[in-house]
Image (spheres, helix red, strand yellow):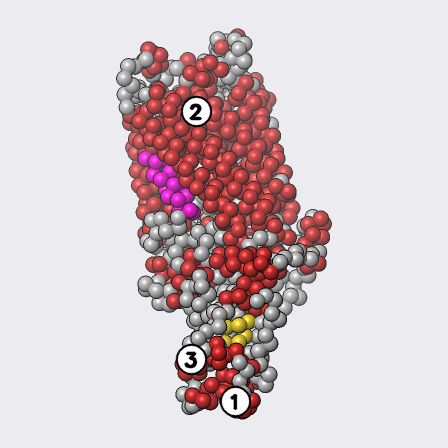
Amino acid sequence: MAETNPNATKPDREPNQPTHWFGLAYLLIFVAGVGFFLLSFIALGVLPGVRLAESMASYPKNEMSDYTLAELRGRHIYARMGCALCHSQQVRFLPADIRRWGAPTEAWETRYDFPQLWGTRRIGPDLAREAGVRSKDWQLTHLFKPQWIVPDSVMPAFPWLFNGRPDRPTADALDLVAYLQTLGRARQSSTGKHFKSHTDMDMSPLIANEINVLDELAFINPQQTHNQLIARGRLLFVRNCTGCHGPSGDGKGPAAIGLLPKPANLLRSRFSTPGLAQILWNGVAGSSMPAWREFTSGDLASLANYVQTLHIDSDVSSVDNTPAPAPTLAQGAVIYTKNCLRCHGVEGKGNGPDSTTLLPRPANFTEVQFDTEQILQVLHEGVAGTAMPAWPNLTTSEKQAVSAFVRSIFNAPKEQNP
Amino acid sequence: MSDPQESVQTKHHAGHKGGPPLSFVAGAKAAHVETQLIRAHVFAALAGLILAALFGTAVAIKLVHPDFLGGQMASAWGSMRASHTQGILFGWLGNTFLAFLYFVVPRLGNRAVMSRRLGWTVFALWNGGVVLLGWLLVAINPTNFFWAIKPLEWTEFPLAVNFVTEFCLVLIALQFIPPLLRKPNEDGIYVSSWYIIGGLVFTLLAFPVGSLVPQLVPGAIGAAFSGLWIHDAIGLFVTPLALAMAYYIFPVRTGQPIHSHFLSMIGFWLLFFAYPLNGTHHYVYSSIPMDTQRAAIVASLIMGLDVILVVLNLLLSLRGQAAKVRGDVSLLFVWTGVVFYLVVSLQGSLQALMPLQRHIHFTDWVIGHSHLAMLGFASFISLGSLIHVWQRSRFVYNQAYMNLSYWLILGGLTVMVIDLSVAGLIQGELWASGAPWLESVRASIPYWWIRVASAVPLLLGFTAYIAGLLVKPTNLSETSLQENNHG
């Protein structure tokens, strides 16, 4: 580097050198500027565009509905609020993406998207498969104050979409949520006959294979001691559940204000293990309880165990813990058959003949046991946000009898620990 | 492609080793220079830099404190992020490039720019109708389609602003290209001019493709066109103009010609051929046809090789000048920018490869990469070039503040890029592991704090830079007076 440069002194320019560089100047404009622009425009825009248009057209139009006006307005809000800066709408053809969100985003699904909202950054999760995953109340409350529902979230709040409370949304907020509920709708409602698998036909065989064996991957479910389960479950509960169910589990978390039906009071309800597993894995349709499938089965087991420890015997425990006398149960069964059976079903599983159209589903008394006081309150007031009415015509003793009856059909979990 | 090389190689070595010298190397100024326009654009650029950097800082703080400046639509995360990126592109780099063009085109073309009135029109439109109007509309966030923020990267400003931008791009081409074409500079056409002509023509064609076409074609097709502009903004607007600066500053400040005309040629033509074909590498593993994705990945590799040649050529032009580079803050800024150009381009080629891409796409790694490009490469070269432009326009600068500014910005950028790259790898790892989503958010928080901390030296560095241009040196050194005399 220390070498001195002999060329630092420049040679004299040749006199009368012809100025032929007009050729170069126009080459710069028409080849570098215009020509290479057109090359890229055709090679990376038009050619793939034609193939994408063909693949979009191969999917019958009548099987995918266009956005409604409200959904379109919501989409526009999504676009101008910059939602796409943190949330992609593009599940890639990759195992990690498919495992988390489902089928990869195909061209035909984006047929009505002007402009595209694929995004190139994920601070929050991808939203391409958001339809039906979370309830309207969940979405609204989350938009109003994300940390109420997801305590560690870094998502900003959108209070100007509300009139001061999460349950008083503006039309904009409702439109936005209507749009969110369309994401992946076409994919969910389609019959599956238009695509064979999760893989792209041009995809490298290695990746295609990786995706195709995804379903066969076993979940790792390490054996843990009960105390480890509870400790892990407590951590998961604090991080994920307290926004709605409250730090103590009483169902009075900050988000509860915007949710109907209200979050369950976990102190006053006992859950069977299969019942909790079903709720955690699938969510509770018709309520704001989402599915928690991103957790491993080990984590779900920890959470279920921890939630079961939350149940405390209330001040009516003396009544609750002694089996009700047989005549009371018999009276309760009669009242139940007469009034409750059409929804809650013969076996109390919430699958009566009238239950099929109800969301959320009627309570399944074999998997959840409410304490007497709570049942009496429900019989008195009904449950807002569900089909459960109040029962003003039942006398107090009748209410107590039916309460004892529905409590008696609970499949109590085996005691694991004192 | 018709072969330009025969005619060019024999006649157009201007400014290269063994070719005719360019008058600008000797410091002569033949044609009239619009000094007031240079000054105005420099001030606008500095205001754009500081404001856009503050927007960026606010956005960084919001990631660790979501309620920071919360509650109003005008200061929403999405809005301020749009103001940050568009402010850097149009407010800071756009004005820098214009200031540089007003300075350099009369020297390269030996002819004044087309019109002073056109110049002030562009100044007013660019800063009033693009930057300020854009920021204002982003803050107001109107619902009307024409005035609303767009969700398209590197063109978030509303369509209304895009029309002004496109109009400006046409005016800019009319202002600066004819002086380089019309009356031949007897020395020939220098490599900086190739990049200026190519970049200005390309950008005025590519900008509407990125801003308008995705609104007109659906979803995945629109994404293919968006990908083009995402890359054209940096590759065919920022890169050619930054390289034009580097190719100009090096020989002028060292008095030593560019190492190889052949490498300059290869570098230029490969860049304009391969860079536009990179676009789809932003959508690898998408439903865009795999052939297109593969073509873009191959083009990204060619691009990396090309940048090695360009940087080699530039750095070889500095052989024997190490002491001068260390002592001259303008050269030091530009030299650092050129080194960052190599690093960021090799990183770009590497991360376009599928095994790395699947891991780092959507993560903070990419944010680190884009800061390395816009701040490390383009802004360092711009900062160095503006010092030169300022000095040769008979304004003085303060060497001490400039040195301070260099080290602050270098330090802040280094911390930020390393921090974001590590964060990106961790995010990608957690996403692939199947851990709950929020694990990746929790794991990112310490890195997002470090990013906020890195804003402190950056903002101080930008302030020191502005002070360096505005505060008179306490005792003017003899060299700076001498250099001023070159004009």
Q: Secondary structure at mark 1?
A: helix
Residue A188 appears left or right of B86: right
Residue annotated with mark 2 = B333
Q: Nearer the viewer, residue A92 or B161?
A: A92
Q: To which residue does mark 1 refer?
A: A328
Q: CA distance from mark 1 to mark 2?
A: 89 Å
Label 3: few (<14), some (14–19) or many (≥20) C-alpha neighbours in 10 Å: few
Is residue B286 covered in magenta? no
Q: Nearer the viewer, mark 3 or mark 2?
A: 3
The correct choice, above or below, for A320 with respect to B378 in the image is: below
**Do discs 3 and 2 belong to a common subunit?**
no
Q: Amino acid at mark 1?
A: Thr
Magenta: main secondary structure: helix
Magenta part of the chain: B47-64
| Residue at the disc numbered 3 | A377
Q: Residue at x 68, y 54 (%)?
A: A211
Q: Position of residue B212 (x, y in %)?
A: 45, 49
Identify the mark nearer the N-term, 3 or 1.
Answer: 1
